[in-house]
Amino acid sequence: MSPLSELPPADGPPSALGPVARAGRPGRRPPKISFEFSPPKTPEAEENLWLAIRRLEPLNPEFVSVTYGAGGSTRERTHRTVMRMLAETTLKPAAHLTCVDAGRDEVDSVIDDYAKAGIRHIVALRGDPPGQIGGAYVPRADGYANATELTRAIASRGDFEVTVGLYPQVHPESPSIAHDIDVLKAKIDAGATRAITQFFFDIDGFLRFMEQVRKAGVTIPIAAGIMPVTNFKGLARMAGPCGIALPDWLANLFSGLDKDPDTRRLIAGAVSAEMCARLEEEGFDNFHFYTLNRADLVYAICRVLGVREGSAA
């Protein structure tokens, strides 16, 4: 299927509708959604973040996650953002936590602080070395070695829901998909209750991967990570170190549009909506949107998928 399948006229018969059109039809159960935000670095960024939060809050996501910089570099901003969400919104925030450049006692203290503050959902990630996305990771001697150890620590210190990451393509440091699935199962044994995937654009590859995951006996909820990005060059910079393949058709769609942001936005929304609708056609109904602290595209995609303000999470 083309990433931008041609849709028939709106008055065409239901059987002729493409997946995007079918996704928003009345009576169709909307998918489960969640959003990721990053703690702001400046007052202007904070204002933009909260505009995005207020725009997306009425869609009633299952949860929203707030990222955590390497070595706790955004710890205070992450904590402040999560606490404000708890105090001022109806959202269910999940705080990211990583192993990078921190000792076990330090990480445990953060876990305990979240528990005391009323946070009951943590996203447990190993993390990347400071300033080296995709770089070689060397655990501290007094720290948690990986996300499995971190998950076990979180689960042992409170009644937390623990979300873990998952690569639908082979993790850059992994020898195989089978190894990645074994790691996921170890995280589940350690206490993980759900997973969210890294963003991807190879739908067929994702479907094959998920078939392997489920055949391996993994039953926890898994949300597909969706990145509605308008800047292909920026996307390539993010994807490369993570080992995420960007298909030629996606590059072709953005080719020659460096000075045309409006068209890039339209394409980004269409691609992401088509991806989600195709995945729904294949039985997936759980999407985690990497918002980049911008709401308009994500809001529009959710509308296309049938999510409405006040929908039950």
Image: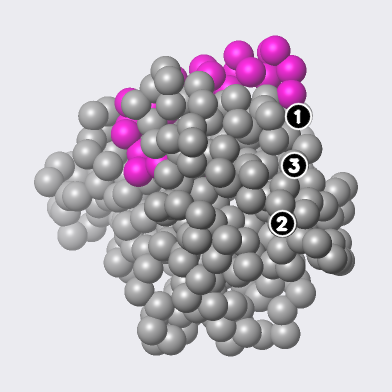
Residues at marks 3 and 1, CA–CA distance in whole angstroms: 36 Å
> Does the magenta-highlighted stretch encompass residue 192?
no
Near mark 1 (Cα within 10 A), the count class, few <14, some 14-19 or many ≥20, is few
Amino acid carrying mark 1 in the image: Lys
Which of the two labelled residues, at mark 3 and mark 1, occupies the earlier sequence position? 3
Tag 2 residue: 104
Tag 1 residue: 259
Please state which of residues 16 and 233 is positioned toward the viewer in this rendering: 233
Amino acid carrying mark 3 in the image: Gly
Numbered disc 1: secondary structure: loop
Q: Where is residue 149 in the image (x, y as percent from the top left)?
A: 63, 68
Numbered disc 3: secondary structure: helix
Residue 250 in view here: no
The colour scheme used here is one colour
* Callout in the foreground (3, 1): 3
Query: Dividing the picture into quarters, in which one does residue 11 lie?
Result: top left
Q: Do the residues labelled 3 and 2 touch (CB within 8 Å)?
A: no
Q: What stretch is highlighted in magenta?
A: 41-65
Which of the two labelled residues, at mark 2 and mark 1, occupies the earlier sequence position? 2
Numbered disc 2: secondary structure: helix
* Callout in the foreground (3, 2): 2
Near mark 2 (Cα within 10 A), the count class, few <14, some 14-19 or many ≥20, is some
Q: In this view, does 211 lie above or below 104?
A: below
Q: In this view, does 155 lie above or below 121?
A: below
Residues at marks 3 and 2, CA–CA distance in whole angstroms: 13 Å
Please state which of residues 8 and 132 is positioned toward the viewer in this rendering: 132
> Does the magenta-highlighted stretch encompass residue 58?
yes
Q: Are marks 2 and 1 in contact (CB under 8 Å)?
A: no
